[in-house]
Image (cartoon, grey):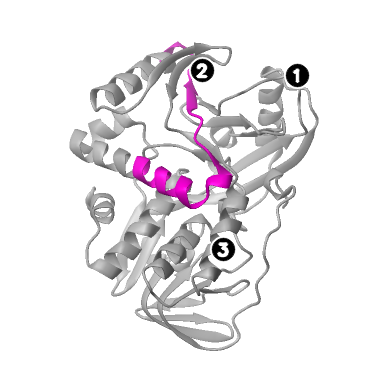
Amino acid sequence: MKTVWDIGAQRPHFAPLKEDRTVDLCVIGLGGSGLTAIHEATARGLKVIGIDAGEIAGEAAGSNGGFLLAGIAEFHHDAVVNFGREKASALYQHTLNEMALMERATPESIRRIGGLRVAFDDEELVDCHRHFDALRLDGFPVEMYDGPEGQGILIPTDGVFHPLNRAISLVQQALKGGAELFAYTKALSVESHLVRTPHGNIEAKNILVAIDGNISVLLPQLSGDVYPVRLQMLSTSPDPGVHFPLPVYTRGAYDYWQQLTDGRICIGGGRDIGGVEEDTNEVRITNEVQNFLDERIKGLGITAPVEHRWAATVSYTKSGLPIAREVMPGVYAIGAYCGTGNVVGALLSRAMVEKITTGQSQAWSDFSEVI
């Protein structure tokens, strides 16, 4: 299923694993999170192998909305209520730190231009004020906003990125660091220090499962904590008649859009419109959600024709917090980012590598211990 991000991108291709390997770290999942872990691990001198059941960034990692947002899935004021101010602020700061590291690693793919949360109605505007007050109280950058897109808040530290090009850059860095990458290599099972694949087994001191949408399929012990969710999007041809200089999200972040530098519009949302049918790992578009997105772009004054329609699956947790867990000795799982994997996934993968190489990671502790 092609997306707007495939335009002009040169996705690298890798062969399947055909023989046994022994390494320090095996990473399962070659999206943004897994590739970040590989880059971090090779930089720390580890012998690393990465595998994926499909192609590089073939799932949500290469087909998401391209947003870089500070914080976890819950807005900061809600996180403060649920987890306490100290913990919520620590998690928020970790994401700010990670965005800086991401920008340093792949500057050509990232634009830290700020982001808008725009109120859909009066009730959401009240919530935007709560959001603003909580961020201000804890010393995080935020401004009230009133502009053509509507009223809400502007978070100047947020931004956008090209998810597929960033993944490609991380692949290049991983290869330079000496990592081995294999595509179309499905992990059949994972146990302590061993990953079984169709044509070769991998012995590893540590294993990182860095998949999102199907994490509970490979690790059924997580099935009580996570559930799959399908996210749908579309993109248009360049539209010179509209101008959205900043990425926008609204309706409690159910809907989101940005205008790319070439003028194309990329919009996603409507998961709630699709209802329980969207709680699935079946990757396909549906008429109900796509019709909603069609009406959404009309309401925004966008008249350019639609070029791409696509879907991807991620995982959510009942708690709203991502999975960051050692599920068995030497086997770590990250995922179920509740739609915020672009930053949180990279953060947790980097934290996992720090933990296994130094024995501790404050970021890993903060995310894995907050319940």
Q: Nearer the viewer, mark 3 or mark 1?
A: 3
Q: Secondary structure at mark 2?
A: loop
* Location of residue 211 in the rendering, given as x and y in whole percent from the top left corner: 48, 60
Which one is in front, 365 or 310? 365
* 159 within the magenta span: no
Spatial CA distance of label 2 from label 3 is: 39 Å
* Location of residue 69 in the rendering, given as x and y in whole percent from the top left corner: 44, 37
Q: Quadrant of residue 75?
A: top left
Q: Nearer the viewer, mark 2 or mark 3?
A: 3
* 109 within the magenta span: yes
* Location of residue 294 in the rendering, given as x and y in whole percent from the top left corner: 71, 28
Spatial CA distance of label 3 from label 1 is: 37 Å
Q: Secondary structure at mark 1?
A: loop
Q: Secondary structure at mark 3?
A: helix
State the residue position of label 3.
171
Which one is in front, 310 or 135? 135
**Bounds of the magenta span?**
95-123
Which one is in front, 162 or 184? 162
- Residue 320's place in the image compared with 259, above or below, is below
Amino acid type at circle 1 is: Gly
Spatial CA distance of label 1 from label 2 is: 22 Å
Q: Hey, which residue is sitting farthest bottom in the picture?
A: 19
* Residue 241, disc: 1
State the residue position of label 2.
120
Crowding around mark 1 (Cα neighbors within 10 Å: few <14, some 14 to 19, many 20+) is few
Q: Are marks 1 and 2 in contact (CB under 8 Å)?
A: no
